[in-house]
Image (cartoon, rainbow, N blue to C red):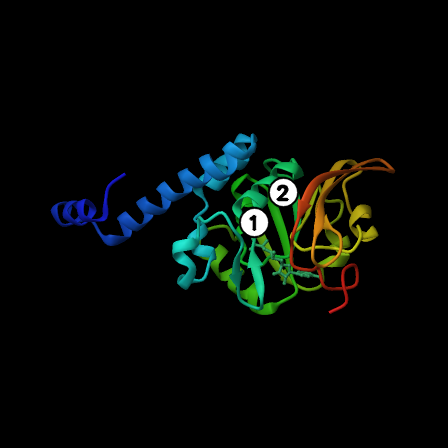
Amino acid sequence: MLGPRLRAILGRMTGSSGRFWAERSAADERDRMVERQLRHRGIVDERVLAAMLVVPREAFVDPAQRALAYADEALPIPSGQTISQPYIVARMTELLGVGPRDRVLEIGTGSGYQAAILAEMGCRVTTIERHAELADGARARLAELGYSDRIEVRVGDGSVGDPGGAPWRGILVAAAAPSIPDALREQLDPAGGRLVLPVGPRDHQDLIVVTRNGNDWLERNDGPVAFVPLVGEGGFPG
Ligand code: SAM
């Protein structure tokens, strides 16, 4: 790792722009995030780790929060919402168990970071956000980063899913539901489709994984989490 002074000197010697060094430094931060926050805590899916290693999280946070982009915590985004902690993004993605060309529905676009991770893994993503301000920001950001061909961002109440796009190989809900919405169970691919979502009261939840096999839905609990509420027909009242 180069110190800032050495970088400045090298930058002057080579004529390299500040942007090169900023990107280099973000890549170093991503390396550390993947090793210390993800691999060290038990994330083992190499496809998830590889995606988290390349998606520039700093592009999804408020410029005022840039220094915290790779911190081990959720961060505020507009409309009173949050971009989830890197570990939670990685864990939910790993639990979803999807791969290249799988069609995935994300509910709660927020900044667009989670959708970018899924797209980086080769998934085709439809993501729904109830706040138009967030959906517009995410759409523009994802286009600038070159993900538009793999991600469709919509505004609406995602708590009822997207029946028109069903069956979904994976449904990832990035906001807390009081119970598992029936509509989401029904929209899962009967041949092993998975739903990952936080379930519980507004102040604390459990991360639940539902796997559908025909007309059987197997549920398992991956442990405690804390999310902003899913607000809508299949969630909490607004
Ligand atoms: N996945 C996001 C990211 O990578 O930045 C973080 C999501 S944030 C924790 C939860 C999001 O769910 C918020 O942006 C919130 O507005 C959204 N949300 C809550 N209820 C919703 C609903 N019924 N339909 C769609 N989005 C909803």
What count of labels does the image hold?
2
- Pick the quarter of the image with the N terminus: top left
Image coordinates of residue 15 in percent, x first then y, are: 15, 49
Q: Quadrant of the C terminus?
A: bottom right
Q: Is mark 1 within 8 Å of ligand 1?
A: yes
Location of residue 210 by image quarter: top right
The quarter holding residue 153 reads: bottom right
Image marks 2 and 1: residues in contact by CB distance under 8 Å:
yes
Label 2 packing within 10 angstroms: few (<14), some (14-19), many (20+):
many
Residue named by callout 2? 92
Above-or-below relation of 221 to 177: above
> In which of the image's four quarters is ligand 1 placed?
bottom right
Task: Give the residue displayed 20% in from the left and 46% down from the top.
Answer: 7
Tell me if residue 149 can be seen.
no
Q: Where does the image place residue 232, in percent across and percent down from the top left?
A: 75, 64
- Disc 2/disc 1 C-alpha distance (Å): 9 Å
Instruction: Reply above or below: 108 against 101.
Output: below
Residue 27, position as x, y percentages in the image: 37, 43
- Badge 2 marks a residue whose secondary structure is helix
Residue drawn at x 64%, y 52% as measured from the top left = 126
Indicate whether 69 appears above or below 188.
below
